[in-house]
Image (cartoon, grey):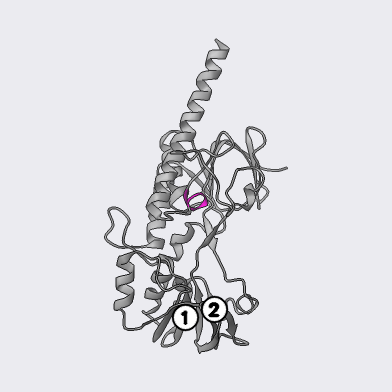
Amino acid sequence: MEDVRRTKLLIIGSGPAGYTAAVYGARAMLAPILVEGLQPGGQLTITTDVENWPGETAIMGPDLMAKMRTQAEHVGAELVSDIIASVDLSKRPFVAVADSGTVFEADTIVVATGASARWLGLESETRLRGRGVSACATCDGFFFRGKHVAVVGGGNTAVEEALFLTNFASKVSLIHRRDALRADKTNQARLFANPKVEMIWNAAVSGVIGEDGVTGIELTDTETGSKRTMDVDGLFIAIGHDPATALFQGQLAMDAEGYILTAPDSTATSVEGVFAAGDVKDKLYRQAVTAAGMGCMAALEAERLLAHGAKSEAREAA
């Protein structure tokens, strides 16, 4: 017999958006259920020092997420270690089925599934993934002590990955296809001041060299098209993320990149009762604090929708 769970508020995904929605949902007496997903805590669990979280001069990403998780449980949210495999948003209550077989019936849903790392799409990159090719410096940087590694990207993520890798590697080459970085000025200043960092401008990685592990990369000049090789021991990809929205394709309105669309100044999606918060809908800021703010908004909007619905039913009964 299948296990059916009924809830006023189901939160799909964790991270700052999901955990904050759980806190506000619990405080609103909605008894929320949060299904944590494949990566409990989200992207911050693979982040090192977080220096822009209000109230914390510096805190490790995993520690911050552990605190948020504990808080969500403390105020009464139920956290479930499972993965949602399918959802049906065509009727209410909404139905979400987990990998374990548990069926969740929910009056409202907050989608906080986040985003995942984007890859270059090279055959050689895929073949050597986990054998010198990585998208997580925090996870794998330790294995490159005293070695030369390359990082691909030009935003804050790439700069932060490169700086973190200088704690282990003897040399870090940051490769960017343009002649200027997109990262904020503070991060750029730190990067350029680090003697272990080498900048490689106007270049794209067009191949990864190696059999059982990375021994080098092929670089293509983005202006001339000329190619050259560089000896490196590891390659870290930091070129952005893709929103984890496959579950909702065809059910929620999205933009061309797969980010969930919401109403202005709101987390409300194209389906009444479904709200989206965090990186699953935000491709502009992508910050922990903005994700948390959206998680708060989503829970408050869900609570207001439920309250108005209850009032309408009471008027009809009278």
| In the foreground, 130 or 100 | 130
Instruction: Give the mark, 1 or 2, whose residue is nearer the N terminus.
Output: 1
Give the vertical position of 293 relative to 221 (above or below): above
Q: Residue furthest right?
A: 1
Q: Quadrant of the N terminus?
A: top right
Task: Answer few, some or many: residues within 10 Å of disc 2's Cα (few below 14, many 20 plus, some between 14 and 19).
Answer: many
Q: Residue at x 42, y 72 (%)?
A: 161
| Range of magenta residues | 278-282
Q: Residue 149: image x %, image y %?
A: 46, 82
Q: Residue at x 44, y 86 (%)?
A: 148
Q: Residue at x 48, y 53 (%)?
A: 279
Identify the residue position indicated by label 1 in the image.
Answer: 150
Residue 284 visible? The answer is: yes
Q: Which mark is residue 205?
A: 2
Residue type of the residue flagged with mark 2: Val
Q: Which of the 4 image quadrants contains residue 107?
A: top right
Circle 2: element type: strand
